[in-house]
Image: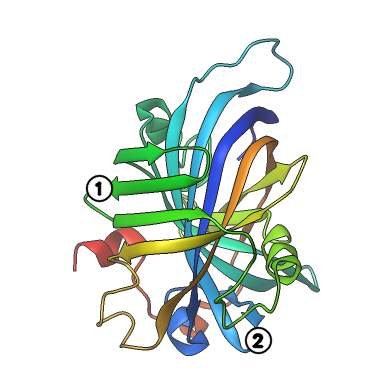
Amino acid sequence: MLHPVLRGRIDRRILVNYRVDPAYLQKCLPAPFRPKLANGWGMAGICLIRMNGLGPRFLPFPLLGSSENGALRFAVEWEQNGQVHQGVYIPARYTTSRLAALAGMRFFPGRHYVARFQVEETADHFRIQLESLQLQLTVAARLAAEFSGSQVFSCLEDASAFFRVGAEGYSEALQPNKFDGVELRILDWKVAPLVVEQVTCDFFEDPHRFPPGTAVFDNALLMKGVTNEFRALSSFCCLLPPASQPQLLSYSEALTK
């Protein structure tokens, strides 16, 4: 999948992060991905972004205005060409932009579902509801003076470093056992801690997928007013023989079961 470098502005990005039992997280991942561990835990969550002014870098004007977007993401590692790579596996994205939803799996990696966002936001308080047929999420948070409460990361710098290396994101392609990728390159990376007053997410609260205690909210981080680029990554195929593939449903198939 090839597309020009896209540049835009992230008005607001919130990372809602869960610590997950690696054995249960692995069940959500297709080969060749495996959980990237932090202090013995797998990490997964939802990224909530308000994008603005997105368009090809070579144009002097953007093609898209403001939109609310979300992405379900898992921190992963995988082997490719004899090397270990790090990034995120993104089974689905959610957006208020119908154009972005149409571009999903055609001109931009991954499935994109149209969703409704309700946002109440001030300079230091945030309440976001994401509603779609595939995902229900509510998070209410405020800026914190310091990073605390995480059972995975001891300080903000450790959490920031872990998520910064997750810039390469891969998703299912239209062709079976193939993955398309994009790098979210943030040119002025800086995160701030959030205190979360409420968080619910039906994906992580499904007891059939994650029995009690296997997926627990851990921390949330905030970015505001940063410039970003989306850069296409080379697609790749899972080279494991079919008999070695885990018998997992795709994300879209699992939603209908």
Can you give x and y, in whole percent of width and height, for residue 51 in the image? 53, 32
Name the residue at the left extreme. Answer: 257
The residue tagged 1 is 132
Residue at 46 percent of width and 52 percent of height: 71
Q: Nearer the viewer, mark 2 or mark 1?
A: 2
Label 2 is placed on what type of residue?
Answer: Asn
Crowd around label 1: few <14 · some 14–19 · many ≥20 (10 Å): some
Name the residue at the front extreme. Answer: 145
Can you give x and y, in whole percent of width and height, for residue 157 in the image? 75, 66
The residue tagged 2 is 39
Q: Is residue 246 visible?
A: no
Residue at 65 percent of width and 77 percent of height: 153
Q: Secondary structure at mark 2?
A: loop
Q: Quadrant of the C terminus?
A: bottom left
Q: Looking at the image, is 7 positioned above or below residue 187?
A: above
Q: Are marks 2 and 1 in contact (CB under 8 Å)?
A: no
Quadrant of the image occupied by residue 58? top right
Can you give x and y, in whole percent of width and height, for residue 13 in the image? 55, 45
